[in-house]
Image (tube, coloured by chain):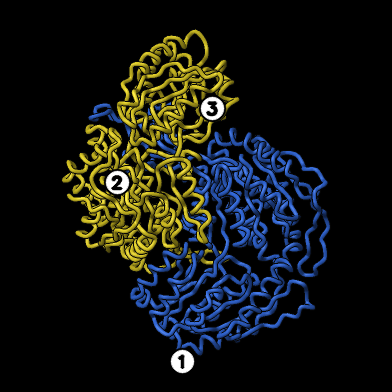
Chain colours: A yellow, B blue
């Protein structure tokens, strides 16, 4: 596989001429081989037009045909895994084992979305039969099914160069829904993006789909992404990244003559609430698990736990002592980019100098060891301090967490009700304690997309029951998830057919149920 | 029942003092008895705080309890129907039979949403069982269920003083979802709004729910509505009305520090495509049905057909002649308000003076007969003229339609692809023609929420399979419907529970399935 450094516009390559950039090795700061050329506005426009033309064909494809395409993309990724993993390691400093796991996750996700397309999992078919004898007016035959929304703009994330990038969850779910995709590559891993993009383009070509089904845009800055989200032929946006970046896209989309939905997964501090019984019984175990979750992948997960609430008092000592020791002993790691590392250092500095916040432990990181080297950090404070300084609840992206001591149960509830929207919220408790704290569970269920009991939030299952979403600012739209098969629903809309002859209906709605779907018929669920 | 003219803020009445207004009899222009006092910003804030407090209780109510509340509201509306219908007739000039039908529809809708809450139709429960032996990591137990989003702002519509107003579809679906509502009354029917609001407040009180579950705000202008949509404790908005009004709310919601979803149903011209075979075989029947749909309720339906595409040529004559005669003979009717009538007259004037547009028929309306009196109007043009002047495709709210002659099948497809998002699109054809025009069906399915075959778009079934929605500008969010049980989904969001002990899980997710739901278990649908 060879890097050309040019955008993929449908089946062709973009032109050189735009602003150039390279990948950077975050371990050394040195540029990596291969120059990448930013896409022009004309190329964005061409990609959008091709996608729109492809949509009219692709939207009519049976689910099984979409599934075959997704399966083929997964197979090509696996067959070319070695090249992809090597480049991804150079561009991100993520270790080979992690990247290997991420590739497996990416392929699993493509196939799971394909399986959902094949089985019509998201068809949502409903049939209300006619009643010609109804008074005062006859009742028509009415049937509805979920149909694809149109071309989708996808933004690759920095922290998952595979699973949330060119062939990641947004791409897989949009294709499963029947939507063409135009991916804006994340500039921190352009080579990985191009390698993956070439394989998707190859799979699209083999499949016989119109080549506009997939485009990949490079850009050193923000222009191509902004033009893409503003383009009238784009009908939805998928994004994983910073709160500022996601909000900028939301604002562009909302200001369009025709506003479109943006599914941005942005910012979460993933609070952990540890109740007294759990702290008394499992202090070391919880501290060890929490430490593992905080420092996993140098803390570069959306679900990294950045805030930990514990009851104040003597009982906290074994927990804090263990956690302090573990944090202090954490070996430094290389972050994804020097910029991300600089932001992390700034966040640690802000917490270090915040009045009333104790810097409980720091693992030293020698800047001479690399431009993106980061150590872990642990801070501690009291709930009153947090309440008086809400900026302490802002996400610090990296291996840092803030332990907050609550003077009472009421103060812990108050803390829960003050946090912003989250991807996850975790409770450590004995089963009896959990039962007695239904009010805490209720508050947190209104704040987060996923609640965990006696676990840790990193590690997001790709599953039917996963909600990787949550109220703003965790995401732009708390009714959505970007992981699991429900992610497909983001790119679908219901369409009703009234009094249509059976043979002209989409197969999902035909009386004989040729696809074997579970359907809502006259208000009752019916298995095939 | 007695009118006080004051907003309902939870269980109490608002204060007098805000700008005053009255209902207006559109038949005479005379003010109706009863003065209404605009809500203050402090009252909006109080209502939002009460709603937020009520949410924490109401969100925990079992579906059956919500259903009982909705049933009780319906029963109270029926028991007090006479007073409501009399006032509604005075405020809207809608005839008694129509209002009687609308009341029945409103009660049906409340009970259908209640039934959905009772049966857990929208629970969307999913269970992925744990697998402790999975490699490389054990798989957790993960379960997800739809939960209510929070307090909802509802805006009453002018054209349905009952079914899309204080106890209308948005209110019913939000309450069924588990969300408190704050309704902004439409100023064109304040008395009807207050009567209905009193009954909802009574039902809430009887039910034992916190009184903040329901508030009703009066406002002569736009301030209270804007403050409501901007309030940080409001989590979603339901609206039916003009494109300008809906867009203004969308813009406010998108600019909030925490953006929230707006479900605005706004603007639709509901195109009708008549193919040659249907025109040849059923010209008079189609013309008669179309006329009925255009003039129904003085054309004041969101689904009023405002654009009709026919093949050009000799074959159009019987159709046009019949339609012209029927339009010319249509008795004038009183519209909802003098303002709506003035806008209608302006729309008719614009079409009358548009170059290339023929005024085919007008039914005379004598302005001396009332300030809101309107006749029907029929215009005709060629597709080229329409393409050259897209403003001809803007909605004219009232009993007017524009017939567009297409020189070829390609031109009809071109027309279909040029229209904006619609609530409905209708095809009249022989079954063979429909089959041969799959491309037209496909284009229209991307443009509209509901496709009709050989019918007329007015008459929106309250049903499980109804989509009363469509791409912008038909609605603000083409993934939604404001009619039918899917409307409830607008106010829900998925929440996942990971490794929770069974007794602490929401009943929808408990292993024994105590609510008897159809659930997705390990990727397969299972009936109870």
**Which percent across, then down, holds residue B41?**
73, 44
Q: Which residue is mark 2?
A: A22
Q: Chain of mark 1?
A: B
Q: CA distance from mark 2 to mark 3?
A: 44 Å
Q: Secondary structure at mark 1?
A: helix
Chain designation of label 3 = A
x and y percent of residue A317 in the render? 45, 9
Crowding near the residue tagged with mark 1, few <14, some 14–19, many ≥20 C-alpha atoms within 10 Å: few
- Which residue carries the number 3 mark? A416
Dots 3 and 1 on the same chain: no
Q: Are marks 1 and 2 in contact (CB under 8 Å)?
A: no
Disc nearest the viewer among 3 and 1: 3
User: Are dots 2 and 3 in contact, CB under 8 Å?
Assistant: no
The chain that hosts pointer 2 is: A
> Mark 1 or mark 2: which is in front?
2
Residue A518 appears in view:
no
B491 or A225, nearer to the observer:
A225
Q: Residues within 10 Å of mark 3 (few under 14, many from 20)?
A: many
Query: Can you give x and y, in whole percent of width and height, for residue B478 in the image?
Result: 48, 57
**Secondary-structure class at tag 2:** strand
Rendered residue at 35%/64% (across/down) = A46
Q: What whole-number distance in Å separates the C-alpha atoms at marks 1 and 2?
A: 66 Å
Q: Nearer the viewer, residue B454 or A362?
A: A362
**Residue placed furthest toward the top:** A314
């Amino acid at each position: 596989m060879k890097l050309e450094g040019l955008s993929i516009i449908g089946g062709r390559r973009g032109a050189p001429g735009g602003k150039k950039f390279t990948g950077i090795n975050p371990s050394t700061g040195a540029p990596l081989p291969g120059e990448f050329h930013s896409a022009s506005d004309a190329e964005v426009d061409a990609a959008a037009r091709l996608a729109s033309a492809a949509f009219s064909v692709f939207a009519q494809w049976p689910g099984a045909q979409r599934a075959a395409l997704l399966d083929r993309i997964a197979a090509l990724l696996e067959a070319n895994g070695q090249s992809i993993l090597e480049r991804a390691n150079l561009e991100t400093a993520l270790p080979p084992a992690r990247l290997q796991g991420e590739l497996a996750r990416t392929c699993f996700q493509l196939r799971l979305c394909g399986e959902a397309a094949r089985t019509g999992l998201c068809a949502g078919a409903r049939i209300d039969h006619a009643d010609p004898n109804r008074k005062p007016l006859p009742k028509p035959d009415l049937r509805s099914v979920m149909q694809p929304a149109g071309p989708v703009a996808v933004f690759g994330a920095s922290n998952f160069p595979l699973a949330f990038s060119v062939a990641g969850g947004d791409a897989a779910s949009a294709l499963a829904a029947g939507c063409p995709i135009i991916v804006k590559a994340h500039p921190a891993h352009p080579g990985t993006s191009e390698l993956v993009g070439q394989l998707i383009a190859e799979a699209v070509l083999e499949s016989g789909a119109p080549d506009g089904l997939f485009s990949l845009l490079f850009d050193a800055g923000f222009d191509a992404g902004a033009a893409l989200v503003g383009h009238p032929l784009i009908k939805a946006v998928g994004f994983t990244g910073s709160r500022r970046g996601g909000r900028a896209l939301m604002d562009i989309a909302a200001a369009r003559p025709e506003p479109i939905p943006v599914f941005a997964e942005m910012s979460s501090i993933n609070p952990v609430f540890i109740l007294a019984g759990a702290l008394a019984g499992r202090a070391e175990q919880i501290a060890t698990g929490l430490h593992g979750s905080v420092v996993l992948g140098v803390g570069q997960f959306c679900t990294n736990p950045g805030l930990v609430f514990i009851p104040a008092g003597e009982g906290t000592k074994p927990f804090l002592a263990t956690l302090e020791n573990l944090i202090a002993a954490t070996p430094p790691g290389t972050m994804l980019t020097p910029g991300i590392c600089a932001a992390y250092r700034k966040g640690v500095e802000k917490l270090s100098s915040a009045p009333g916040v104790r810097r409980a432990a720091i693992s030293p990181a020698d800047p001479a060891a690399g431009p993106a080297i980061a150590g872990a950090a642990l801070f501690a404070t009291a709930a009153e301090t947090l309440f008086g300084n809400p900026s302490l609840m802002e996400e610090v992206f990296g291996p840092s967490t803030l332990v907050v001591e609550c003077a009472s149960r009421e103060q812990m509830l108050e803390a829960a009700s003050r946090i912003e929207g989250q991807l996850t919220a975790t409770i450590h408790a004995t089963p009896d304690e959990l039962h007695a704290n239904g009010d805490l569970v209720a508050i947190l269920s209104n704040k987060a997309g996923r609640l965990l009991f006696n676990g840790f939030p990193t590690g997001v299952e790709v599953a039917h029951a996963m909600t990787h979403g949550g109220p703003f600012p965790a995401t732009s739209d708390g009714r959505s998830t970007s992981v699991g098969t429900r992610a497909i629903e983001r790119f679908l809309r219901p369409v009703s057919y009234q009094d249509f002859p059976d043979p002209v209906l989409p197969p999902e709605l035909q009386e004989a149920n040729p696809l074997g779907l579970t359907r809502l018929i006259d208000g009752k669920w019916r298995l095939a």
